[in-house]
């Protein structure tokens, strides 16, 4: 596969990165995503070929962009001397996202194997487990702060939908893919900090909508 051609000159690309990162200009960042998405998808395709990842190259590219947007700050921009250094960082983000996907796939596979090997529960155990899951779901729902997070809670953690599909299904709640990832991060942060939730064994309920 031929390497995608980048239409930006060095100065234009570097200037866009400066506006996006230093000025936190969302429009500049959107322009960068449009311009460099083919390149990130090319790198993602290479990762998928070598790591057997079950996510699309577009989703991997979007996640890499979201990771870079969250990590790059005005303070650290000065460490990138030129456009090549910034693109090298984006390639690192693609690789990191790909590795995370592989780890997640492996973890899900191992957990499914453990569930398949688990002996059949008694009716009493099933009733108790369902009650615990209902209580956990109730506590989780209390943590939700916005309509966006409510959507994330159900569609990401119950339906297991990818962020791009959630964005497509709810354009009235999410303007960009970044806003989907941001809502997910905010919700997870509060869930981790909730003292009431720490008493539960999340693994026991994760496949039943908590």
Image (cartoon, rainbow, N blue to C red):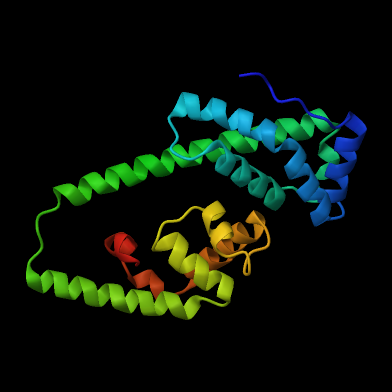
In the foreground, 65 or 59? 59
Residue 60, image x, y percentages: 56, 40
The picture quadrant where one finds residue 79 is top right
Q: Residue at x 21, y 71 (%)?
A: 129
In the orientation shown, which residue stands out farthest toward the right? 11
Please name the residue shown 30% across and 42% down the image: 109
Q: Is residue 74 visible?
A: no
The relative height of residue 111 versus residue 52 in the rendered view (above or below) is below
Task: Look at the image and tell me whether residue 101 can be seen.
Answer: yes
Q: Position of residue 94 (x, y in %)?
A: 61, 36
4 versus 154 height, above or below: above
145 sits to left or right of 141: right
Most foreground residue, 26 or 90: 26
* Residue 208 in the figure: left or right of residue 45: left
- Seen in the picture, residue 97 relative to 186 is either above or below; the reply is above
- Picture coordinates of residue 171, whole percent (x, y): 62, 64
- The outermost residue toward the top is 2
At 92% across and 33% down in the image, what residue appears? 11
* Image quadrant in which the N terminus is located: top right
Which residue shows up at 39% across the image and 41% down it?
Answer: 105
Q: Position of residue 145 (x, y in %)?
A: 56, 77
**Residue closest to the eye, 13 or 24:** 13
Where residue 15 sits, quadrant-wise, is top right
């Amino acid at each position: 596969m031929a390497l995608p051609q980048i239409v930006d000159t060095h100065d234009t690309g570097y200037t866009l990165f400066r506006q996006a990162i230093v000025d936190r200009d969302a429009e500049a960042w959107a322009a960068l995503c449009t311009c460099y998405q083919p390149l990130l998808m090319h790198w993602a395709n290479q990762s998928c070929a070598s790591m057997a990842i079950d996510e699309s190259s577009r989703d991997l590219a979007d996640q890499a962009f979201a990771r870079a947007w969250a990590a790059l700050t005005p303070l650290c921009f000065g460490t990138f001397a030129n456009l090549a250094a910034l693109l090298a960082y984006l390639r690192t983000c693609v690789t990191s996202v790909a590795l995370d996907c592989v780890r997640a796939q492996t973890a899900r596979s191992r957990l499914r194997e453990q569930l398949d090997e688990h002996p059949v529960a008694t009716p009493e155990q099933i009733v108790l487990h369902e009650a615990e899951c209902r209580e956990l779901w109730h506590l989780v729902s209390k943590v939700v702060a916005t309509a966006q997070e409510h959507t994330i809670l159900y569609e990401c953690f119950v339906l297991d939908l990818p962020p791009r599909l959630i964005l497509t299904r709810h354009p009235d709640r999410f303007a960009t893919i970044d806003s989907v990832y941001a809502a997910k991060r905010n919700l997870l942060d509060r869930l981790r900090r909730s003292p009431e939730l720490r008493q539960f064994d999340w693994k026991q309920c994760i496949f039943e909508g908590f």
